[in-house]
Amino acid sequence: MAVTDEQLIGWLVHPDRLVRSASLELLTSSYVSHSKILPAIFSAWDRWGAEDAYPEFPLISHLPIPSEMVSECLTRAESMSQGRKLVDRVCRCAGKLIEALSVCDPSVLEAHMASLERLKQSSKVFFRVPIESMKDRIAASHRSSSSLSIDFEDGQPTDIAIALEMLLERGEARAWMVRGFEEWSEQSDPSPLARALLEVASRHPLEGFESELLELSQSDLVAIADQASIALIRCRSPRTLTLIADQFAHMGRAGQLRSVDIIRRTRLDRSSNLLHYLLPLGREFIVQDAIRMAEILLFDFDALEEWLEAFLLADDTSLKRTMYALPIVYPLALEKVPGEWPRIRQLIHSRVGSQIELPHPTP
């Protein structure tokens, strides 16, 4: 089994800053939405400071915010931005908090809109989502379903995306989603609905449409393939793994690489087993190497021998891209295979040497 959400959330307050940072990166790359993530981050900030708790936190694009913590987010963001420049790491952390808040449920957002506007005007916090976009979502949440449906016929692409999102939250969007995916396959120039659907899918999990999304993830157009891949990762659906297993041998190199990335980032129970199956089906060395990189970053220590083999055979240049995550091998080994830690440590050091410091075995 790949390293779990629960393990990673627990390590968000680990004494080692590199373990904390790696855990947060792995969680957010999988778009994990769990109410315990933000309290753990705040706990680490309070203990070590926003600059040292998570060295790469300002780069993160997804952070679930429980509704009961919105007020605290605003208070912290205002305090963190005082007297700091926009490029300051602490100020950037504040901006990420507000960006995550800006896309939460409109009913939650509405209650705090006045505070958000004051923060935007009075502080140096930078967040990319315009105030007007937030207000548009709030206004749409008060419209009837029949009124929202009008936007699909004569609205702008942004209006269609907002209308689709509101209907999705009400459980009334399926007919429009089916139509949108049909229009992707029927038209050489996708309709505004089709494009809006993919935008919404990249922000909200659309379970039941894994087949359609996997097809779009194979697109030659990078922007389309990227959004579809993100949508599949957000779903974190076992059906996605089944579809990839069935289609992988017939995919081109780019499609295989995207599929491997989807498997890695979803971190499901069968992910590492699937990678073992796919390895000989990789079209080129670059695909097979990506599969080994994915296996390393899944950290499936239930299959320790296979993990060690992947680490041993991985390309040197590619292996450097896993360095940010390697610190979690120590707490993971202590939990799963404590007696194997000397061997794990020795193999890692044989490949990466002094590039990473790992604790010595306890005598």
Image (cartoon, rainbow, N blue to C red):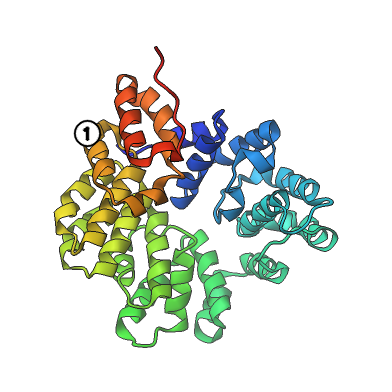
Residue 93 in view here: yes
Name the spot of residue 50 as percent of width and height, x first: 68, 42
**Residue depicted at 38% across the width and 51% down the height:** 265
- Decide: is 272 above or below 143: above
**Figure quadrant of the N terminus:** top left
- Decide: is 43 above or below 322: above
**Residue depicted at 34% across the width and 57% down the height:** 261
Name the spot of residue 250 as percent of width and height, x first: 16, 68
Name the spot of residue 146 as percent of width and height, x first: 54, 74
Q: Is residue 273 left or right of residue 194?
A: left
**Figure quadrant of the C terminus:** top left
Crowding near the residue tagged with mark 1, few <14, some 14–19, many ≥20 C-alpha atoms within 10 Å: few
Residue 270 in view here: no
The residue indicated by pointer 1 is: 305
**Residue depicted at 48% across the width and 70% down the height:** 199
- Decide: is 252 above or below 235: below
Extreme-top residue of the structure: 363
Q: Is residue 227 left or right of residue 289?
A: right
Amino acid at pointer 1? Glu
Quarter of the rendering containing residue 254 = bottom left
**Residue depicted at 45% across the width and 25% down the height:** 359
Identify the secondary structure beneath mark 1.
helix
- Give the camera-side residue of 203 and 44: 44
Number of labels in the image equals 1
Q: Is residue 36 left or right of residue 302?
A: right
